[in-house]
Image: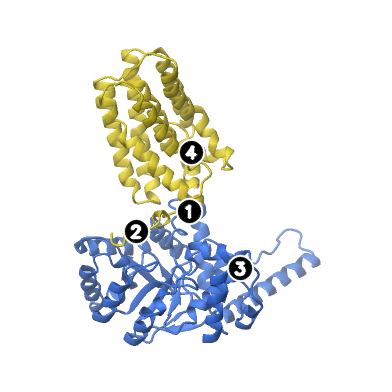
Chain colours: A blue, B yellow
């Protein structure tokens, strides 16, 4: 979000003028710094196309479900504005998330429809024949010409939805197709779908504690050329609460972490199969902090093992 | 839903506590001074309960039915549904309870038991609690006065007041009026418990108290 420069109008004296010039200089410098920071965000390729995405996206579970509350909607728009300003692109939502889609759509309108947006939504209905109508409603909420990515939410009626999504992709009404699960559910079925269907993305839960996907799903994603979105990076806040009272380990500085959130996110995005993690937040400070995790240096494999052991012991 | 055992209550909570209680704040602000009218209706209902009588019980049932219908529309459907898609079903259940109150309470007529000390005190106690004590609980546990929940405006005090009247009522048909309020107590308790609200036990306790008291009563 652009920083406003306020210039005092009445009774301009030399001191006030100098203050105003200084404020303007700081704003300009800050804007340039932000642009430079946005440029240095770690990008990850989507294997099926080669298109790159920032390694940190933005989730919307709970955080953007604020209904008609104008104050809260403005606050969400500010979070999304700062996400884009920090170099973010992918925003993920679902028809299951209450008013989140409409709140995102409202924010995008307030922000002048940022061109950087990579819109990721889901289809979540059964029977599958209701899918097209639900997708159209979702698109209407977001107010986008088409979604970049549509995923079958929690594998609900995936046998019916995947043909619909693939047909939309073939007609150019959609760019990518995926499936999602969370908190370790139905991993065998996820694997089976990854092996037998053409997918661009798979979305799973992965963090320093919940590491089931490391055994089979992440290697399979690499083998099959499927991009991986990671949800619940902080276990819906529980993981942050768990570690927050402890000091950051001294070695956190070696991987450029100044907070637990960054350490936990760097653990996730440093896995070679992961395309991006999607932490959700209602805080501008947190979205900026999260985006800072998408920068070099990332931990190497030995450091990743050390991180997992350390966090598990807390 | 497969692997249902892996789901926790928090998996079904779609909103933050801040959003949930802010909903009451905005709702109260939008309908002000409707709260005064609601309180007057509640106090009039209390006076009618004390007086007893055939027509009084019909008026009480009508007031309750109107309250349930208003909460169904103004709270569940028009507001809560904006952050919780399940609220559309809650609206339907509340509207159904309003119809049941009209059918069994207004048309058929509720029979309020004569005041007999302890039992009527239990029913009256629940109604008084819903009207006067319940609105104070939110502020007492740290929530803003602007988020106060009032009888005939918000679901919880409306449900508790109804439970009080149903404790006072006799006849088999009153058992048909109990399932929806009792279920709401569980839904509300689960929601507030998941949000770690300090008063989360209140609605389940109200339900358990009602069932315990009614089980001990002759029909």
Circle 1 residue:
B16
Element type at marker 1? Answer: loop
Can residue A163 be seen here? The reply is yes
The local crowd at label 3, few if under 14, some if 14 to 19, many if 20 or more residues have their Cα within 10 Å, is few
Can residue B152 be seen here? The reply is no
The Cα atoms of the two marked residues, 4 and 1, are separated by 19 Å
The Cα atoms of the two marked residues, 2 and 4, are separated by 38 Å
In-front residue for pair B74/A46? A46
| Quarter of image, res A122 | bottom left
Circle 2 residue:
B5
On the picture, is A222 further left or further right than A198? right
Query: Pointer 3 indicates a residue of which chain?
Result: A
Residue A205 screen position, x and y as percent: 41, 70
* Disc on the earlier residue, 2 or 4: 2
Label 2 vs label 1, nearer the camera: 2
Residue A232 screen position, x and y as percent: 45, 67
Label 4 vs label 1, nearer the camera: 1
Element type at marker 2? Answer: helix
**The C terminus of chain B - image quarter:** top left
Residue contact at pointers 2 and 4, CB within 8 angstroms: no
| Discs 3 and 2 share one subunit | no
The Cα atoms of the two marked residues, 3 and 1, are separated by 29 Å
The Cα atoms of the two marked residues, 2 and 1, are separated by 23 Å
In the image, residue A241 above or below residue A198: above
* Disc on the earlier residue, 2 or 1: 2
Q: Where residue B28 is drawn, which disc sits there?
A: 4
Query: Pointer 4 indicates a residue of which chain?
Result: B
* Disc on the earlier residue, 4 or 1: 1
Residue B27 screen position, x and y as percent: 46, 41
The Cα atoms of the two marked residues, 4 and 3, are separated by 35 Å
Circle 3 residue:
A3
Residue A230 screen position, x and y as percent: 43, 73
């Amino acid at each position: 979000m652009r920083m406003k420069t306020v210039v005092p109008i009445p009774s301009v004296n030399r001191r006030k003028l100098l203050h105003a010039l200084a404020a303007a200089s700081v704003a300009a410098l800050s804007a340039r710094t932000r642009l430079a920071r946005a440029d240095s965000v770690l990008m990850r390729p989507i294997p099926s196309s080669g298109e790159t995405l920032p390694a940190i996206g933005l989730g919307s579970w709970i955080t953007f479900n604020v209904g008609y509350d104008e104050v809260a909607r403005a606050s969400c728009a500010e979070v999304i504005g700062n996400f884009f300003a920090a170099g973010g692109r992918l925003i993920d939502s679902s028809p299951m998330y209450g008013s989140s889609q409409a709140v995102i759509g409202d924010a995008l309108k307030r922000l002048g429809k940022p061109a950087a947006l990579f819109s990721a939504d889901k289809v979540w209905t059964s029977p599958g024949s209701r899918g097209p109508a639900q997708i159209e409603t979702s698109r209407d909420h977001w107010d986008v010409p088409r979604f970049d990515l549509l995923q079958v939410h929690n594998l609900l009626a995936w046998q019916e939805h995947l043909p619909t999504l693939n047909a939309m992709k073939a007609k150019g009404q959609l760019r990518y197709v995926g499936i999602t699960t969370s908190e370790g559910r139905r991993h065998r079925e996820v694997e089976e779908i990854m092996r037998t269907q053409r997918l661009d993305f798979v979305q799973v839960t992965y963090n320093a504690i919940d590491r089931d996907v490391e055994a089979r799903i992440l290697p399979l994603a690499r083998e099959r050329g499927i991009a991986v979105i990671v949800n619940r990076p902080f276990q819906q806040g529980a993981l942050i609460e768990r570690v927050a009272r402890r000091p950051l380990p001294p070695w956190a500085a070696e991987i450029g972490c100044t907070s637990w959130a960054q350490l936990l996110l760097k653990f996730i995005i440093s896995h070679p199969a992961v395309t991006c993690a999607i932490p959700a937040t209602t805080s501008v400070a947190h979205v900026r902090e999260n985006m800072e995790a998408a920068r070099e240096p990332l931990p190497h494999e030995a450091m990743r093992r050390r991180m997992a052991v350390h966090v598990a012991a807390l | 839903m497969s692997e249902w055992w892996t789901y926790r209550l928090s998996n079904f909570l779609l909103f933050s506590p801040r959003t949930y209680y802010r909903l009451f704040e905005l709702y109260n602000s939008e309908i002000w001074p409707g709260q005064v009218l609601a309180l007057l209706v509640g106090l009039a209902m209390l006076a009618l309960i004390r007086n007893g009588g055939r027509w009084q019980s019909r008026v009480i049932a009508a007031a309750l039915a109107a309250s349930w219908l208003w909460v169904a529309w103004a709270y569940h459907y028009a507001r809560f549904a904006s952050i919780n898609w399940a609220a559309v079903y809650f609206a339907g259940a509340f509207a159904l309870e309003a119809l049941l109150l009209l059918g069994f309470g207004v048309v058929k007529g509720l029979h309020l038991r004569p005041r007999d000390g302890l039992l009527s005190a239990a029913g009256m106690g629940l109604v008084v609690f819903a009207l006067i004590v319940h609105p104070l609980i939110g502020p007492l546990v740290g929530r803003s006065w602007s988020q106060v929940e009032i009888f005939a405006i918000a679901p919880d005090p409306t449900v508790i007041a109804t439970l009080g009247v149903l404790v006072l009522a006799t006849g088999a048909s009153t058992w048909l009026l109990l399932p929806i309020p009792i279920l709401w107590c569980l839904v509300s308790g689960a929601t507030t418990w998941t949000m770690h609200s300090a008063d989360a036990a209140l609605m389940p306790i109200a339900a358990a108290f009602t069932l315990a008291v009614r089980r001990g009563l002759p029909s």
